[in-house]
Image (cartoon, rainbow, N blue to C red):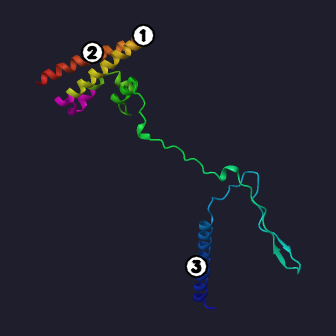
Amino acid sequence: MTPAAASRARKIALAVAAGLLAALALYRWLGSREPPLPVRAGTSAPPPTAFETGPLGRPQPTPSPPVARPPDAATPRPRPSVFDFAMMTPPARTSAHKDEEQFPTTAWFTEEDLHHPERYFALAERMPELNRPEERHDTLEFFLAYRAKLARDLDAAGVRPDERQEILATVERYDSAIARLRTLIEGDR
């Protein structure tokens, strides 16, 4: 047999085997009304059909023992209820969560930078685009909003002296930065 003929014969054999497997799977799928029972852990699947010899010494197939089905397999199972995720309400937003969104920090603008607004003016000396009137207005709005947050933090601090001192020092820095920025904005007009 030539190599080409052997290759062709092998391909035909594989195609026939694949077709038989597909036909068997289709037959079992169409013939089965119920899904197969799962094999429980610790038990084994029933052995394949054993052969016994008949009266003439020929092998006779013995039927497998019947598989016990759980009692609920015959009754239809109730369908699970449907949950509508659109009906869920979002979690309530706390003021801390709003502050995190309003005053984000990055790798180059850290939490420490939020406590030192005077760093803006040092940066504005190196970056002329920060001296434009619209940038100054945006910065003033940011400073005023953060100053209002500091006032809320001061109220929430209560009587804790260390925390109050730190917040009061930051408030003083923001008050002086706001006054300085307002002077620069007035000079622009």
Q: Which residue in the structure is indicated by mark 3? A: 15
Amino acid of disc 1: Gly
Q: What span is in magenta?
A: 122-136
Question: Residue 125's mark?
Answer: none
Closer to viewer: mark 3 or mark 1: 3
The residue to which callout 2 is attached is: 175
Displayed quadrant of residue 145: top left
7 or 181, which lies in front? 7
Point out residue 133 in the picture as x, y percentages from the top left corner.
16, 29
Q: Quadrant of residue 80?
A: top right
Residue shown at 43% from the left, 8% from the top: 159
Q: Is residue 51 left or right of residue 181?
A: right
Q: Which mark is residue 158?
A: 1
Residue located at (68% from left, 55% from top):
38
Q: Please state which amino acid type lies under the numbered disc 2.
A: Asp
Residue 177 relative to residue 160: left or right: left
**Pointer 3 and pointer 1: residues touching (CB < 8 Å)?**
no
Magenta segment, principal secondary structure? helix
Quarter of the picture holding the C terminus: top left
Residue 42 screen position, x and y as percent: 76, 51
Earlier in the chain: of badge 3 and badge 2, it is: 3
Distance, label 3 to label 1, CA atoms, is 82 Å
Q: Secondary structure at mark 1?
A: loop
Distance between the alpha carbons at the discs numbered 1 and 2: 21 Å
